[in-house]
Amino acid sequence: MYRLRFTTVVAAPLTVAFDVARALGRPWPFPLEEVESVRPVSDRYAGGPDSGRRRVTHARTFTATGAGTVVEEEVSWETGLPGPLGGLVDRAVLRRRVLRAMRRHLDGYAALAAVRALDVVQVVGAAIVRGDGAGGSEVLVAQRGSGALAGLWEFPGGKVEPGEGHEAALVRECAEELGVAVVPQAFVGEVPLDGAVAGGAPGASTLRVWWARLAGGEPVAHEHRELRWVRAADLEALDWIAADRPLLPAVRALLARL
């Protein structure tokens, strides 16, 4: 079995990166069958031109980062030829073909995903931290005051405006909702949103969260029922909005190391 690995950073959220990759398919002249698929984190396809003698497997994983989605792909194949002859064919012909096909495919994929991402309204959140570690760090959480999610807790934030960077949107939302200036520090995580955001397709948008420090002012609940500073041990006891709850392990780990 021979293999090559490829890594691409796509300027798109997890959902868009995954859906565009699925729509484009793979750059091979024969069909592959789905082996497994977990939206929006991984998929794997396998097949070949002659029922297994020259089998190809193409696996992808999608990982959220502050810069976008990192797509890692592994292509593995068999030549159908024995021993040294198979290795010679791989080095002289097949490996070069795989490299050329994947480079063309990935260039087009990254460009298309970035364009598609412009049509998806994203949501950002801020895990605002105070304290200096040693068990004393706390994160600011906010309780919804109205609507279907009234009474549930979340990290402050909101929708990204057209043409606005994600971290810039986070700073703006904190100023509007809390009356404070914040400085984003590092990316925490990303969670797909089940419903539609701003009229978009259901399941297309995600919540992307950074942790941040206060740069000025004291938080005031302009749009929430209540604000609360919470330590890591007390996060789980709150009644969280479904989109925010998957981020709790990362936030607890963050508070433990700061």
Image (tube, rainbow, N blue to C red):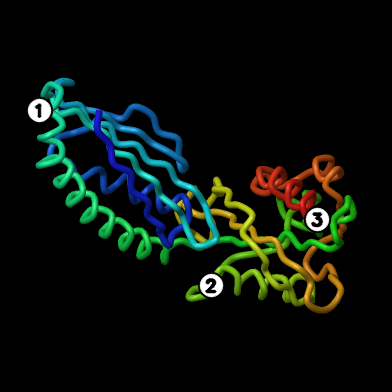
Which class describes the residues within 10 Å of circle 1: few (<14), some (14-19), or many (20+)? Answer: few
Q: Which amino acid does label 2 sit on?
A: Gly
Q: Mark 2 points at which residue?
A: 165
Q: In this view, does 186 lie above or below 256?
A: below
- CA–CA distance in space, label 1 to label 2: 53 Å
Between 26 and 238, the one nearer to me in the picture: 26
Q: Mark 1 points at which residue?
A: 85
Q: In this view, does 42 lie above or below 257?
A: above
- CA–CA distance in space, label 3 to label 1: 66 Å
Q: Do the residues labelled 3 and 1 touch (CB within 8 Å)?
A: no
Q: Give whichever of discs 2 and 3 has the lower sequence position.
A: 3
Q: Which amino acid does label 1 sit on?
A: Leu
Q: In which image quadrant can residue 245 be found?
A: top right
Comparing labels 2 and 3, the label whose residue is closer to the camera: 2
Question: For the residue labelled by badge 2, is the local secondary structure a helix, a strand or a loop?
Answer: loop
Between 35 and 161, the one nearer to me in the picture: 35
Q: Name the residue under label 3.
A: 143
State the quadrant of the N terminus. top left
* Image position of 129 (left or right of 163): right
Q: In which image quadrant can residue 59 be found?
A: top left
Q: What residue type is labelled 3?
A: Gln
